[in-house]
Image (cartoon, helix red, strand yellow):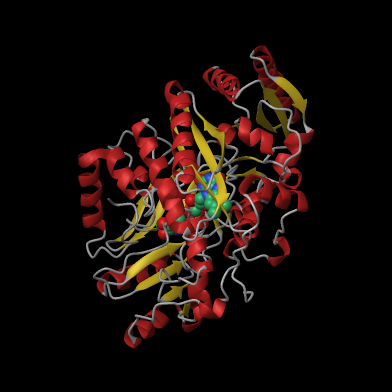
Amino acid sequence: MSDRMHWSRWGDPARTTTLPANALAMLELAFGPPAPRPAVDQQTVQLPAVGLPDDVLDALRDAIGVEHVDAGVEPRLLHTGGKSTPDLLALRGGDAAAAPDAVLRPADHDEVQALVSFCSERRIAVVPYGGGTSVVGGLTASRDGLVAVVAIDLGRLDRLVDVDEVSSTAVLQAGVSGPRAEELLGEHGMTLGHFPQSFEFATVGGFAATRSSGQSSSGYGRFDTMVVGLKVATPLGTWELGVAPASAAGPDLRQLVLGSEGTLGIVTEVRLAVRTKPATAVYETWRFPTFVDGATAMRTLTQDGINPTVLRLSDETETSLNLAKPESIGADSGGGALMVCGYEGTDGRVERMRREVGEVLQGLGGTPLGAEDGEQWAEGRFDAPYLRDALLDEGVLVETLETATFWGDLDRLYAEVKAALEGALSAQGTNPIVLCHISHVYRTGASLYFTVACRETDDPRAQWYAAKQAASDAIVAAGGTITHHHAVGRDHRPWYAEEIGPIGTDVLRAVKRSVDPAGVLNPGVLIP
Ligand SMILES: Cc1cc2nc3c(=O)[nH]c(=O)nc-3n(C[C@H](O)[C@H](O)[C@H](O)COP(=O)(O)OP(=O)(O)OC[C@H]3O[C@@H](n4cnc5c(N)ncnc54)[C@H](O)[C@@H]3O)c2cc1C
């Protein structure tokens, strides 16, 4: 780690991004004179004293090997919280109160199971840790009433366990990252087709635990629709689910594990529906006169059963900032709303899909812009997070939030969340830029993904929480879901309780009590 803490740099100094000169000029134009705010030196960060008694550390070392139990400063810091802006701000400001007491790296399901059983017996809080990319406080366990907190890092569970080419399924261990999944499946001519923006670091177990959704969800579906089976380590023992592609044998308990965010058990293996690796991929862009026009075109496509692999529509502000090309921020975008359409498959299928989509979009007022911008979007689609530290260094707060609703309510949800964000941040004297795009589409509705940028106040965490509170209240009031794919974590719990109501809350609490009687699994996360 460098002496300056740049927590969103994802551990790869080669990818460290500095802001281009025109971006700095734009920031000044948008937010006023520069007000740099560098991160504190790593040495000044405060970690809680290790709370694990020696006999516990010894037992953990016996269970998984001495070199896989680490209570040192660096691993604890690297497993402190996730990657939300408040998490980054805390660490950049020297606050590591969320650090676990030790990081444990088990090798396989049996070792994970042994750790979960032991921690349950000894009342030690367990944070399952995949890629550490949670943006909702999903990696910050409550210590209340518990002896200590350990992070169970699943990085050593990184194997392809089985491929069934006839059924088109593959079993992957939970710690397999996005690129590793593609590499392992690629050897069999297959793809998972799950490409969230956090693809480079997030893991299969994390995708399942948070019901993640990738940028190709229009064609490949969201992650939870790919899961056909799960193996889970719980305090009660091993739980295996999913024996057939579909079943009428009672409620689908896989759905209880999907999205459970480590509160009901640790997912160690996932059986997934996989696809043939596409021979061709083409990404192109279209311009619509307005965001509303573009949304109507998207709805028409999905309701006609025409599903390009990627379908994404920026609102007018996001289009004008040309987010797909950070190096050309401020370039004239030509106005309107930009849509990205991607097609993957055989040459013939791509050509057919492209023609079919083109006919619909052109008929609904779209102007084809060709493949250049689309290809650039595809190439740079994992790059934006590398800008976050550079922006925070400049005293510019950037954060995102997302929601979803039915098509009939989408315009209202969009307007109200945007107004809430603008209102809450302007009230603090920091006029924001609020961008939005439709990120995932369904026959019945779509998700909205907002990005907010503004100058930091003296207390940027409080500043953001006020905006987040206003936006979350607006989401609930407009009938949207509090999260379409980022999950609940700690940050969304109050609104999640409203969304599922008192009966839903009781059901969830009862399940939690029964499977995790000592309450050690990710306490404080998800369960209202
Ligand atoms: C820059 C950025 C972009 C992002 N883009 C997207 C996006 O496009 N789409 C999207 O869906 N999300 C996105 N996210 C959110 C995040 O990447 C997802 O929630 C992802 O699924 C988390 O995976 P992970 O392996 O990093 O899990 P972690 O962050 O390590 O954990 C997430 C939660 O799941 C629990 N958990 C992790 N592994 C397991 C396991 N094996 N068993 C049980 N519980 C477990 C953790 O305790 C935690 O509560 C983004 C995040 C960032 C920082």
From the viewer's side, name the closer residue of 42 and 341.
42
Q: Which residue is painted at 74% across and 22% down in the image?
A: 368
Residue 406 in view of the camera: no
Give the residue furthest to the top.
Answer: 363
Residue 516 in view of the camera: yes
Q: Which residue is painted at 48% across and 48% down in the image?
A: 271
x, y (%) of residue 3? 62, 76
Vertical arrangement, residue 75 with respect to residue 481, above or below = below
From the viewer's side, name the closer residue of 182 and 312.
312
Q: Which residue is painted at 68% across and 46% down in the image?
A: 29
Vertical arrangement, residue 236 with respect to residue 178, above or below = below
Q: Which residue is painted at 69% across and 24% down in the image?
A: 287
From the viewer's side, name the closer residue of 67 and 10.
10
Q: Is residue 489 left or right of residue 270?
A: left
Vertical arrangement, residue 119 with respect to residue 296, above or below = below
In the picture, residue 176 is in which quadrant? Answer: bottom right
x, y (%) of residue 173? 50, 58
